[in-house]
Amino acid sequence: MTAPRLRTEPSIAHLDADAFFASVEQAQRPSLRGRPVLVGGTGPRGVVAAASYEARAMGVRSAMSMASARRACPQATVVVPRFDAYTAYSARIMAALRERSDAVEPLSIDEAFADLGAVRPGPGGWPGVARDLRERAVELAGVPVSVGMGRSKLVAKLASAAAKPAGVVVVAPEDEDAFLLPMPVRSLWGVGPVSAERLEKIGVRTVEDLRGQPLDTLTMVLGDAAGSNLFRVARGWDDRPVAETRERKSAGAEHTFERDLHGRAEVAAQLPAVVDQAYARLERHGGAARTVTAKVRFAGFSTVTRAVSLPSPTADRAALHEAAARALDLVELTEPVRLLGVAFSGLSEHAQLMLDLAGPADPAAPGSPAAPDLGGDPGAGADPGAGADPGTDDPDALRPVARRRRGRLRVDDAAPGLDVRHPVHGRGWVVRTRDDGRVAVRFETAATGPGRQIWLDPATEEVELVGALGPDGAELPEGPAEEQPAPGRVSGGG
Ligand SMILES: [Mg+2]
């Protein structure tokens, strides 16, 4: 295995919002600023989707069960996720990147790579470029973000993690070893708890330990694909380009399961049906693909994608099935699985043309099937090191708020975190609900400063469920749900 040619400047940026969902809540609700906030399922089996830094200081992590999180941090305010608001803030963050580069590759709602190779650094050098980018994203979106830069995606992503919260880290090529070698292997892409344990058994804890291992040892311990991948990663050998991936340059399908799947056999058994569905879409568009991506969303809502690329685009059904199985093999299945997706990308020109002619197909909702982040990025969207707490999910409690009906608040729909309006007190949000149906509402917005809390009875008072506000303070239109619950149904996409 030989070293790829890497760039000589640290011109790949990775921007990642800090505690994104919780930060949006704190931006919009002044009384939550500086306080522990947990976003996630509020039911007895809920999980934490995001924890503010104040809550993290108490040991709370995302994907933890909400019950343990509340025990660790009893003073925390717990709210349900509001994906419509997060989507609007996300667009502002991505805009800061798109001002600087045509090549922006979102990995998830709150993080993206950008190739800044065309930027000419000023007197501040690359650190100055990183600081400007960070400040612009904060200016546009009003939530804290961190920026990492390096000469590869690998280093840029690790650098943004090192920059958190609200910082920038630029790793110059000559400093790369000093940055990488002391890192625990767990912080690397593709190293989950299972791989980490196997590596620990052969005495590998840091990247430096990893670099000391011959290729055949790593492939023996981790398998061919993961072993050779880590061999390269340990050396910083990552020449993947930042891919401006457009939604319709891929065809795919994904399947949300009524009940979480447990274990590889159960997940693998569901794969052919999803591949068939994706293949049907590919065929309709003239069908040949070069890259096959498997996407897995876990019960804790973290998402992992793994891609396998073929030597040339193919329309061969069996070859694509086989590639999808290989891509799925690269995903570590340590948690119950709620969603399985397959996307075909790197389509032949003919296929791309057919897709373009097909016009705007499915709305480009984040998390929609075959969303752009399926661009063949190992570990895209993965949350390295996130502690899993399997078996504690509550998909119902994590239902996108967009799906709740606007209008007069119904007692059954009341949940902490929802936006409401009262004819006298104005706009506020539900802080807590009581068994007798009464709700505590705090009347405040980003523009008002901290507001007061009032107990109201929706049965007798006009409490109206309203849409969230965007970063500009305007109410967001009622949009499509971020994730359609389609139990037992394959939804096409791309
Ligand atoms: Mg983030």
Image: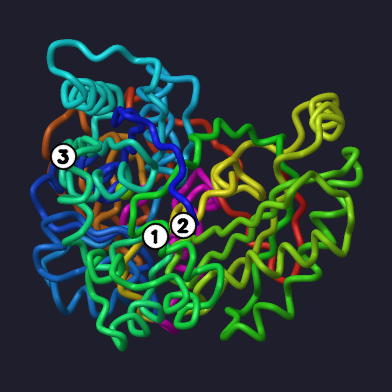
Look at mark 2 in the image and give the residue it sits on.
379
Is any atom of residue 240 visible in this view?
yes
Position of residue 33 in the picture relative to residue 243 (left or right): left
Look at mark 3 in the image and give the residue it sits on.
166
Mark closest to the chain's N terminus, 3 or 1? 3
Image position, residue 34 (x, y; %): 8, 48
Q: What colour scheme was applied to this rendering of the protein?
A: rainbow
Look at mark 1 in the image and give the residue it sits on.
189
Q: Residue at x 25, y 83 (%)?
A: 203
For residue 427, which quarter of the picture? top left
Q: Which residues are magenta?
A: 390-418
Q: Residue at x 44, y 76 (%)?
A: 393
10 Å neighbourhood of mark 2: few (<14), some, or many (≥20)? many
Question: Is ligand 1 less than 8 Å from the beta carbon at label 1?
Answer: no
Cα separation between marks 3 and 2: 23 Å
10 Å neighbourhood of mark 3: few (<14), some, or many (≥20)? some
Image position, residue 489 (x, y; %): 76, 66
Q: Amino acid at mark 3?
A: Ala
Task: Give the camera-side residue of 95 and 177.
Answer: 177
- The correct choice, above or below, for 43 with respect to 327 in the image is below
Cα separation between marks 3 and 1: 22 Å
Q: Residue at x 34, y 38 (%)?
A: 14
Mark closest to the chain's N terminus, 3 or 2? 3
Image position, residue 447 (x, y; %): 20, 27
Q: Are marks 3 and 1 in contact (CB under 8 Å)?
A: no
Q: Residue at x 33, y 36 (%)?
A: 151
